[in-house]
Amino acid sequence: MNMATMRLLLFSFMYCCSTALWEVSSASKARHNFKWEVGYVFWSPDCVESAVIGINGQFPGPTIRAKAGDTIVVELKNSLPTEGVVIHWHGIRQFGTPWADGTASISQCAINPDETFVYRFKVDKAGTHMYHGHYGMQRAGGLYGSLIVEVAEGEEEPFHYDGEFNLLLSDWYHQNIFDQMAGLSSKPFRWIGEPQTLLINGRGQYNCSLEAKMNGSSSACDTSSSSCDVEPVVLPVLPMKTYRLRIASITSLASLNLATGNHKMTVVEADGNYVEPFAVDDMDIYSGESYSVLITTDQNPSSNYWISVGVRGRLPKTQPALAILNYQPNSPSMAMSSRPPTTPAWNDYARSRAFSHKIFSRQGAPTPPQNHPSIPHRQIALLGTQTRIDGHIRWSINNISLVLPSTPYLVSMRYGLKGAFGAPTKPTESLPRGYNVSKPPTNPNSTEGGNVYRLRFNATVDVILQNANALADNVSEIHPWHLHGHDFWVLGYGEGLFGKKDAAGFNLKNPPLRNTVVVFPYGWTAIRFVANNPGVWAFHCHIEPHLHMGMGVIFAEGIEHVGKIPDEAVGCGMAGKMWMKPPRVKH
Amino acid sequence: MNMATMRLLLFSFMYCCSTALWEVSSASKARHNFKWEVGYVFWSPDCVESAVIGINGQFPGPTIRAKAGDTIVVELKNSLPTEGVVIHWHGIRQFGTPWADGTASISQCAINPDETFVYRFKVDKAGTHMYHGHYGMQRAGGLYGSLIVEVAEGEEEPFHYDGEFNLLLSDWYHQNIFDQMAGLSSKPFRWIGEPQTLLINGRGQYNCSLEAKMNGSSSACDTSSSSCDVEPVVLPVLPMKTYRLRIASITSLASLNLATGNHKMTVVEADGNYVEPFAVDDMDIYSGESYSVLITTDQNPSSNYWISVGVRGRLPKTQPALAILNYQPNSPSMAMSSRPPTTPAWNDYARSRAFSHKIFSRQGAPTPPQNHPSIPHRQIALLGTQTRIDGHIRWSINNISLVLPSTPYLVSMRYGLKGAFGAPTKPTESLPRGYNVSKPPTNPNSTEGGNVYRLRFNATVDVILQNANALADNVSEIHPWHLHGHDFWVLGYGEGLFGKKDAAGFNLKNPPLRNTVVVFPYGWTAIRFVANNPGVWAFHCHIEPHLHMGMGVIFAEGIEHVGKIPDEAVGCGMAGKMWMKPPRVKH
């Protein structure tokens, strides 16, 4: 293969996963215009067909690719028959455009059927991002895709690679989201259970061993539809090259681990921020997180190799997802000489902690502001517990379970609408003294609420995310928390109840910047951010059913600096009632 | 049994089916206040469980009972997670309250999740009515119930009966409505198929012979869930009494026939209008229709008897629904001595026509205005055809397939919003000369549109509903058409293409008043009404998937007389954009 062919091949790798309509501008800062229509589409992500929420007739939605500094304009038409819709641009901080954050009841009214809303925002920073529905459980219904931001024109990544691949990981349920939501709100409670299938780029094999199938076993795939044959994800690589894998997880529930076997991975990016490179054989990815890793194709080139994605933190009832590292010019369907790498035992939390503890910001990255008398500083401790309200099982933060109001927070707060949400004047922000995190809550009853923390503009805010035992004995779950409108520094992790002395151990030297961070069972995670982005921002567990059950809070900051909210974003709830002024007509 | 016991028993019959919260007022005109919450609820209508749309946690919704002249006030809270909702009060003409008709995009904006809309309207006329969702296919999703209006205080029905029962008939699908809607809009088209079960008062037996079960056959019911055992509907009766059966059909698709065997039925009411009594052994009921029949319990009282409900007009793949006429004091579960009556062959259209032709208004009922030079008169012919738009299969009227706009018609027309819906200036209202109704359409391509017929206020309007062959050879379907805001007189039925001379045969003497009427395959049905109700009214095939596929038109009349539309009904579409006036705030 000569160099020209190789370059062509590499070029095609670079864009092979991008199916979005996009325009290249010769100017350094481009504007990318998209017309998207959200609607149900029949799809068989894993050989089992159902109506999923697609964009422009496809699932997952089209991949957006842009460069740092570019502007994205998505004209989103809602063609769902009866449901509202929004799209959240996960990882984009929305400086100056908080109404474009795409969170129903928080940043905007859901877009009604047959209506169009224009999302217009700047992608200010390179990184591996994603987008997804943020209304009901529409994300779990299939409304998601990748948003890849490359470095600005003329700039370079601080690492070299010859080609890249995009791996958007998700989990898939055969029960439709309406039944799922009804179950979570039911008395007695009905849990959604484990996903049927793990998907890579929207493709998986239900009840089917891809490995056995590739190796010629005829009884490998027990699918009811014999005509269905979801192709595995194939990554065509050249020997002795370096590839960037962009890996993001948009799972509804599952915490994942991705393993590449003998191909060592060097982690270089987390949630759109460079990290100090470190090498691993496998890595955990929680819902809402993204990473870039570099792999070098240094194995015997006469074979192909498996990439495995397995479940972490819950007893797995779902088969690992597999992708194929296809050394060119081998056939992608050739039998493999090695077995798929095994992902770690689901309950090996020590290994998970060890992975998280390896992540530090890359040298030269911004460090968190230190405590200083001249800088307003606030510490908010959020105790996440599983609770009951009127017999319904809920997740609560400081004993309040988040229920979103019909008037978006951004609207009611910007315009000072009184009574638009039932938040306590000042929600609790300290941990109950001596709370026993290793036992079920003594009083598991909680209340519903708005859970709004008003932050002083430009204040430095530390949040302690405190995990605890759930309602059942000896159960504490993983919660990956995602913050909108911000990156935050991860100052540290610990086990048991956070205490004042733990703050002394915070990493203020090179904590990684992220937008999503895991809270381990029975443990705590401390983060810091600067409340410098005028808007109202959700901060919540990224597990879809956990958020649906109330596991989140709202941060509001610099509201007086929020610009003109588009009228289309405000036409619901109390605002819709107060400001709807039809002209007078003769009767 | 003494008279007092019997009266008590009869009294309990009268109210046994009413589960609604209702208040009795000593004043002659009462106001009935309801607080309803619409949400998903797990239910097993036929032993197969799914999340259905319920009201206050029940399916079907609570029965409303009121007296003629009363006011109904329903505070409807939408607790669906992501869907809008409306409720149509089928059979109530909404004089003076066209915004309470409960048709999304026609009379109001759909009520957003977490919002409340107050339906306030007068039930001006006694009759057997119903209510149901009128947005997407939410009716098929379970959003329906009975609305029974008794004669006003001090008035009497023109027939005697000792007790009454309410039989709300429906059909039930195991595929959820989102998959159903996606299929109907898909390319290639996916039809919803025949229902799995027929329900009486929301209860049925899937894949189960109730007859065999009652008679002790152990293998009678092949249900996967052995613990489920939906009780049959039992009508406890005393011998030699007369009972009123109120029968209404709210099916998504199925045309039905109800048979009572040796118990002759005397039909006395149709769609809330008295008819000249006539006796039958079985009767057809199309979706959207209601009847009252009287039966006398004159059979051997030592046995119970079956009532059967079977499918008409389509090759049945659904077992008949059964109810039990339970002669007291027999046990309702005693073995039957007779077999369930057999409903007529599905394709015996002659019998169906004969039944329809027997229905005349009761003596003394209002007769239609005759043609007179001083009365504006208009004839509108509506040819219903199955067509294609961009490869999608649709139903069209005069070659336009109804697609509802995001701004409700009532709002855009009352306020003169230009461009809010894409209706042709004046849609066609005559039949194509020489159209061959017995062949598929020569050019099956049609267009989408608003299909609004503006009627001169108080004009007499004749509508000819013309049926034709569908896209496939030798197929012409039944279409029961329902008019909102009006009763109409059924002037006549005919076969083939309607011609001018057919008008000479119109029954102007005693045509029945109805709000729903069937159009037989390859035939036509003529109706007349007076456009005397200011508002915008849907007129459509009551088969849920047919309406979803565009089979309807809009009548607008006396718009300038429409009063103040509640602001809550206007906050969507163009109106929402134009009239949303948030106050100015400092930036």
Image (cartoon, coloured by chain):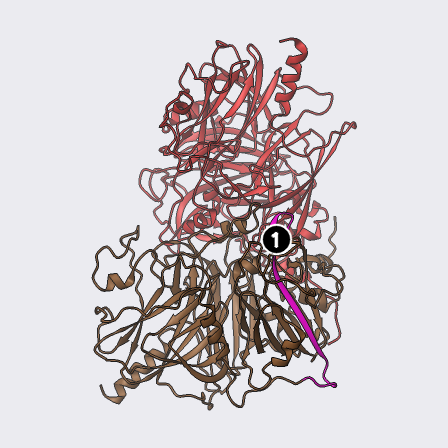
Chain colours: A red, B brown
Region rendered in magenta:
B371-394
Residue with the mark numbered 1:
A113
Image point 34% across, 43% down: which residue? A440
Viewer-proximal residue among A46 and B324: B324
Viewer-proximal residue among B197 and B128: B197
In this rendering, the answer to whether A523 lies above or below B450 is above
As helix, strand or loop, the secondary structure at mark 1 comes to loop
Q: Amino acid at mark 1?
A: Pro
Q: Within the magenta stretch, is there residue B378?
A: yes
Place of residue A528 in the rendered image (x, y in percent of width and height, measured from the top left): 56, 33
Instruction: Specify the quadrant of the image occupied by residue A471.
Output: top left
Instruction: Specify the quadrant of the image occupied by residue B317.
Output: bottom left
Image point 69% across, 29% down: which residue? A68
Viewer-proximal residue among B463 and B12: B463
Q: Residues within 10 Å of mark 1 (few under 14, many from 20)?
A: many
In this rendering, the answer to whether B148 lies above or below A4 is below
